[in-house]
Amino acid sequence: MSIETPTDQQSFHPRIKMIPARKADPELRRAYRRTTELWGATGSPPMAMQIVQCFGNRPHYVEPVALGYHYTGWCGTLPRTVRESVAVLVSRYNDCFY
């Protein structure tokens, strides 16, 4: 497994247009706010928002994705170390940086 990084000749161009909260329409801003409240996220902007912003082009997906991420990643009885280990293994299997 290798992680490619941009060289001087290359630059990173995301394939999905991210919509920050300050540029979001009212429906998307509401979804971002509810996600932030669900996760108890803090900061400006909350790091949690960076995860769900890729769904900003489909505002009706933001909350279900955030809810799923919340329940699979942060709720339940498994210790955080176990949840983090599972996330690392899944990201490695999918050849995705975690």
Image (cartoon, helix red, strand yellow):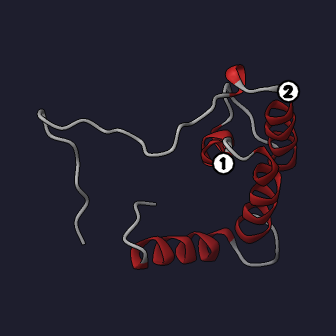
Which element type, helix, strand or loop, lies under badge 1? helix
The residue to which callout 2 is attached is: 26
Instruction: Name the residue nearer the viewer: 84 or 19.
Output: 19
Distance Cα–Cα, label 2 vs label 1? 15 Å
- Image: 34 above or below 77: above
16 horizontally vs 40: left or right: left
Q: Amino acid at mark 2?
A: Pro
Q: Find residue 82 and report its image quarter.
A: bottom right
First in sequence: mark 2 vs mark 1? 2
45 horizontally vs 37: left or right: left
Residue at 70% from the left image edge and 74% from the top image edge = 79
Instruction: Name the residue nearer the viewer: 53 or 47.
Output: 53
Q: Position of residue 46 (x, y in %)?
A: 68, 34
Q: Position of residue 72 (x, y in %)?
A: 73, 71
54 horizontally vs 10: left or right: right
Residue at 83% from the left image edge and 41% from the top image edge = 31
The residue to which callout 1 is attached is: 55
